[in-house]
Image (cartoon, rainbow, N blue to C red):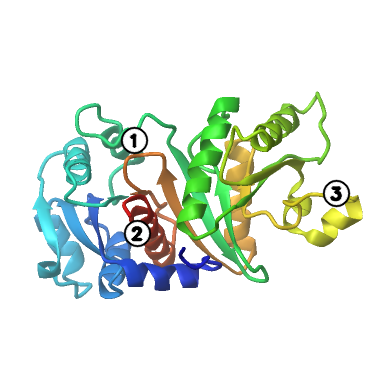
Amino acid sequence: MMKKITSLVELLAYAKEIGPKKIAVALAEDAEVMEAVESARKEGVADAFLVGDADKLKKVTEPMGIDLSNYEVVDVKGGQGEIGIEAVKLVSSGQADILMKGMISTANFLRGVLNKEVGLRSGGTLSHVYIHQVEGYDRIFFICDPAFNIAPDFQTKVNLINNTVNLAHAFGIETPKVAALAAVEVVNQDMPCTIDAAMLTQMNRRGQIKGCIIDGPLALDNAISEESAMHKGIVSDVAGHADILHVPDIEAGNMLAKAIVYFANNKTAGLVLGAKAPVVLTSRSDSPETKLLSIASAVVLSAYENK
C-alpha cells in the first residue's frame, strides 16, 4: 500500500514518482494555465496536448520562453464548443489521461465533458473537491462540494461523499474520516442538514456507505479540533480528526474553501470528480501553484484508478 500523503508538498513529490501522465488542455492559449502546464512538464508530472488556435498559442508562449516543440499542439480554429470536444475526445479515446480547462468558458467545457457521444460521463454524479494543506495541521482536508452541486438532495450527498472518499484512498488515506457538517452537533428538525448528517452517519454504520467513517452532525470546530470536541463532550472517531469536510450546500462549501485560501497559510488544489477521468477545473484567480497542485492531484488519482 502506498504511503499516506499528509501534505500537498508530499503529493507533488509522489506525482513526480508516478508521472508523467498526459493532459488534454482545452483552449490552452492562457499565460497562467501555460505556466502551470510548463511547470508540470519540467517537474516530470505531466505532458500535454494543447488544444486551440496554434497561432494564438504561439503569441502567448513565445514571450514566456516556452518551447512548443515539447508539446503536441492540436490546432483547432473553431469556436469554444469545438475546441472543448476535441480536448475531451483525446481523453475518451485514451490518448490523454486527464482533461484540463484552459481559457474555455466553464459552460462550454462541461458541455464537452457531458457530450453523449464522446464525453466522459460515468453514470455517476459530477462533483468538485477542494484539497487544502493548512499550516498547523498534520493532514490534508478535502471539502466536498464547494463548487458544483448547489443544494444537493440526500442521494447526491451520498454520491459526493463516495467520490471524495475514492480520492482520499488515492492519497493513501485508507479509512478517511468524514465530518457531515452543520451549524450544531445535535439533530434539530428545524435544520434539515442535521437530519441528513445523522442519516449519512447511520448508513455508514450499517455498511451502506463504505471505505470511510462518517459522523455528524458536527460543527466545524468539533470536526477539526480535538480540544473543542472534548469540551463539548463529543465521543467520536471523527471529531477532531476529520479528513473530509462534507458541507450541506454550495454556499457553505464555497465560503469555507475561500476562507482557508485567504485567511490561512495554505496550499490548495481542486478537481472535478465522478467522470471517467480526472478533470482539472481551476479558477482564473487561482495561483500557478494551485493549478500545478491540481494537475498533480489529477495525476495521483489517474494512477490510482488505472492501477
Distance between the alpha carbons at the discs numbered 1 and 2: 24 Å
Residue matched to label 2: 299
Residue 248 vs residue 160: left or right? Answer: right
Please state which of residues 8 and 69 is positioned toward the viewer in this rendering.
Answer: 8
Q: Which residue is mark 3?
A: 234
- In this view, the residue in front, 272 or 216, is 216
Q: Quadrant of the C terminus?
A: bottom left
Check residue 107 in the rendering and tell me which mark sits there, or answer none: 1
Rendered location of residue 86, percent (x, y)? 16, 42
At horizontal 34% and vertical 35% (from top left) the residue drawn is: 107
Asked where in the image residue 260 lies, by quadrant, the reply is bottom right
Residue type at the position of mark 1: Ala
Residue 231 appears at what percent x and percent y? 90, 56
The residue under label 2 is which amino acid type?
Val
Between marks 1 and 3, how big is the CA–CA gap? Answer: 43 Å
Labelled disc at residue 44: none
